[in-house]
Image (cartoon, grey):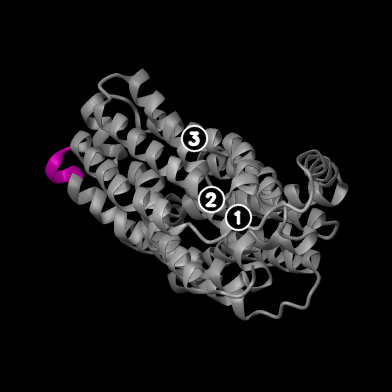
Amino acid sequence: MTTPGPGLTRALVALCLTEIVSWGTLYYSLPVAVSQIAGDTGWSDELITGIFSASLAISAIMAIPVGRLIDRIGPRIVMTAGAAVSSAALAAVGLSRTLPEFILAWLIAGAAQAGVLYPPAFTAITRWYGAKRTWPLTIVTLTGGLASTVFAPLTAHLAASLGWHKTYFVLAALTAVITIPLHAVFLSPPWPGLRKSKSEHSRTATSIRRSAKFRCLQVSLTAIMLALFAVTINMVPLMMARGRSYQTAATTRGLVGAGQLAGRFLFTVLPRHAAPSSQLTVLTVTGAVALGLIAVIPGPAAILIASAIFAGAIRGSATLVQANAVSERWGTEQYGTLNGLLSAPVTFAMAAAPFLGSFVFGLTGSTAMTAAIFALVGLVGVVFATKS
């Protein structure tokens, strides 16, 4: 189905709303609440952040079977179930009184992420819209990018006034009230059936994922996303090491998010006639250049901030390049299966990026060296992009 109708429009609006809530509650809430949780429980910030990274790793593992399932039955049941599990997991976080309970709740939340965040939404849009998918994908990622703007201050306010336990009860209730009915009611457009039998579909997917082109695509996207996330997520300490104030560093970190939104919009106006491998090559080259600028430019502050925003824009574009990578190379029929396989190592990289960026910075003690090392990681992405 490639002609948008009322059913598709309603489904797209529903996904825009649910992505804001799902990203806000499952992804952005814990980094905001971590200090209060640590102060209340005595668990270290590093331990809590490590638990969050473990939940992202679970999401990466679950992305593969979830993508395969959506290919077969569509997004409605899968994303509704994911929303229900999300709500239950967030409530379990609020109920947690011991470290094992807290860990288990976040591991369940990680499994739920695979059913409600971008990969399943991208699969739904790609299969429904076909060749007209670019703008719908962009709209979902642009609105999803508002999740931190909405939920970071909301979580901070709730945690300060209610405490972190009750905060997660509120987030669980919001997830249940908003995302479960929207998924259940509005993700109802007819689902394009698979033209091949289940066994033929499996053989084709296996053949593609074992191909050199698919593996190069995985390595390239994983490398550039790891490099960009490792530096931009750690922008506050990196900027402060350059002698900038905490306020300037925090403002820069916030502007990276604005750069992401700009990068996603820019993606839609770029020429679409280039080969997919050329698009990815341009992305990885510009990503490495952005990190190189952070490495070599000591100041003034305005130039450093501009370089960080540039890196954020490339990071935003990378989300849409990833969303289109499978369909531009192998079509849309088995998008869920292949995108799940593609997303898994990228999600692992995103989970490891905060720690690796902090570790490299602690090891080198230098913003320039940290950015330069990750620029080299980005160049690995360039090499493999040319073969994808």
Q: Is residue 161 magenta?
A: yes
Name the residue at 77% across, 78% down. 273
Task: Give the residue furthest to the left.
Answer: 161
Dot 3 corresponds to which residue? 111
Residue under circle 1?
123
Q: Can you give x and y, in whole percent of width and height, for residue 369 in the image?
A: 61, 50
Image height check: is 268 above or below 225?
A: below
Q: Earlier in the sequence, mark 2 or mark 3?
A: 2
Which amino acid, by three-letter code, is at mark 1? Thr
In this figure, which residue is indicated by the disc labeled 2? 75
> Main SS type for the magenta part?
helix
Amino acid under disc 2:
Pro
Q: Which residues are magenta?
A: 159-163
Marks 1 and 2: in contact by CB < 8 Å?
Answer: yes
Q: Residue at x 56, y 37 (%)?
A: 363
251 relative position to 341: left or right? left
Relative to residue 297, is residue 338 drawn left or right?
right
Q: Which residue shows up at 69% across the image and 65% down it?
A: 283
- Considering the numbered disc 2 on the image, is that residue within a helix, a strand or a loop? helix
Density class for disc 2 (Cα within 10 Å; few <14, some 14-19, many ≥20) is many
As for residue 263 lying within the magenta part, the answer is no
x then y, percent, for residue 282: 73, 68
Foreground mark, 2 or 3? 2
Which is closer to the viewer, label 3 or label 1?
1
Q: In the depicted view, which residue is nearer to us: 288 or 319?
A: 319
The location of residue 118, given as percent across then percent down, is 52, 53
Please, what is the three-letter code of the amino acid marked with disc 3? Ala
Give residue 280's quadrant in the image: bottom right
